[in-house]
Amino acid sequence: MAGGEEGSPAAAVALLLPPAREERSSSRRRRCREGCPGCRQEEASKARAGVPYLDFFYIWVVCLAAALPIQSLFPYLYFMIRDLKIAKEEQDIGFYAGFVGATYFLGRTISAVPWGMFADKYGRKPCIVISILAVVVFNTLFGLSTTYWMAIVTRGLLGLLCGILGPIKAYASEVCRKEHQALGISLVTSSRAIALVIGPAIGGFLAQPAKKYPNLFSEESIFGRFPYFLPCFVISVLAAGSCIACIWLPETLHFHNDDKVEAIDELEAQAGDSDLDAQKAKESRGESTKNLLKNWQLMSAVILYCIFSLHDTAYLEIFSLWAVSSRKFQGLSLTSQDVGTVLAVSGFGVLVYQLAIYPFLAKYFGPIKPFRPAAVLSILLLATYPFMTNLHGPELKILINIASLLKNMFAVSPVSANMFAGPVLFFFLVSLVSKLV
């Protein structure tokens, strides 16, 4: 036990601190303020040795509810823009649909940093609750849109007010002990992977219910008058349930309202450090920032991640529009239900791949080596898509499912490598297309 304590990070930090600063640091660490929810949760996590399964389940449900509106839109977006009659010609539908899909992400881009600051000042839980309430309200209004601009505004407000992306990751790491933080972060990722499966299925199967299920929904009902309300309503109900689950989520942010104690701590720190040490620390922080920006390996990884994220999002929207477009415009003339099935199958395949195949590939090959062949194969795979317009019937549905599955597997290759299953299925696909064409 003694040897383990000497080798711990806390012991290493203690060796670097002068005795006086070490004593002040340990006293500040030991101080637990009454009434602070963060301190209370921290003490509860220390006392609980096991995994907080219930808290993790609530986090998973909340992340799922926040991610579903992103994926459910694309199977029926083309038909929604057509029914809103904003496009004068059929070939202009994709132009207007692009703005609806982009508005959500524009709102999230604008509000991401402010929401992080809000969560750091007022708490993680208020941020989570407001985000889920935004899903309930504006996702419902989006399904009730009667004009193009109503769809734009409600979708933009949904992205602007759903600031859960960053705070939920911080929350997942704070609600548990340090050894369980990786599990908490992985639950956030897995919930979004599940949304890749459930979201398109909800959008594809529940849009236009009066036409698909006339025995259950009449044209005079609210679901007949608003054909895209049902998938939004189902997601809003799920979000409302997750909002109720937020009642049992503990707050993890430290609210230390004792300003006098904070001021004393600050004065002690200033008294213990000379002006020269403060100047050196300031210069060191500046140099650290410059060195970070000059770290070309890190910056290259960030740039590549941004490029592939852009590529993946663009593919998701363009594929949905192309798949439902008319044959005279070189589309596939699929229904929203067909598109939802394709996206759900590929999302489920990627989930299985990440859980069952990727750990073995990462163990033996690492995440870097398979990156280049996956990127090249992704380009070649996309080059085969125009030839699929010559296919019909079962052959088309089989190939489009295989191609979509491969594309999603290649898309996660920058993070989770793809070396064996992808190339084998890819060359099978190319040979099959060449035979059919």
Image (tube, rainbow, N blue to C red):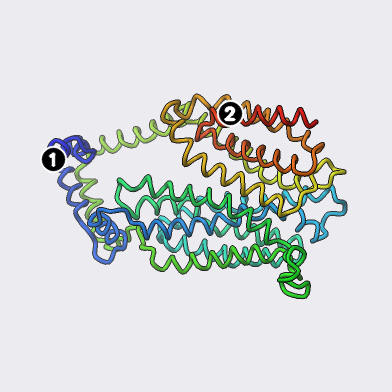
- Classify mark 1: helix, strand or loop: loop
Q: Between disc 1 and disc 2, whose residue precedes?
A: 1
In the rendered image, the residue lying farthest to the left is: 2
Q: Is residue 175 left or right of residue 225?
A: left
Q: Position of residue 3 (x, y in %)?
A: 14, 35
Disc 2 secondary structure class: helix
Q: Which residue is mark 1?
A: 1
Q: Is residue 29 above or below residue 83?
A: above
Residue type pointed to by label 1: Met
Find residue 429 and report its horizontal and vertical position in percent: 68, 31
Q: Nearer the viewer, residue 268 or 109?
A: 109
Q: Position of residue 381 (x, y in %)?
A: 68, 31
Camera-nearest label, 1 or 2: 2
Towards the viewer: 322 or 12? 322
Query: What's the residue type where badge 2 is placed?
Result: Ala
Circle number at residue 374? 2
| Residue under the image location 39 percent in, 34 percent down | 286
Q: Of residues 267 and 222, which is closer to you in this image?
A: 222
Q: Quadrant of residue 366?
A: top left
Q: Which residue is rendered at x = 75% and y = 39% of the image?
A: 395
Residue at 42% from the left image edge and 26% from the top image edge:
364
Indicate the quadrant containing the N terminus: top left, top right, bottom left or bottom right. Answer: top left
Q: Quadrant of residue 254?
A: bottom left
Categorize mark 1 by other alpha carbons within 10 Å: few (<14), some (14-19), many (20+). Answer: few
Q: CA distance from mark 1 to mark 2?
A: 46 Å
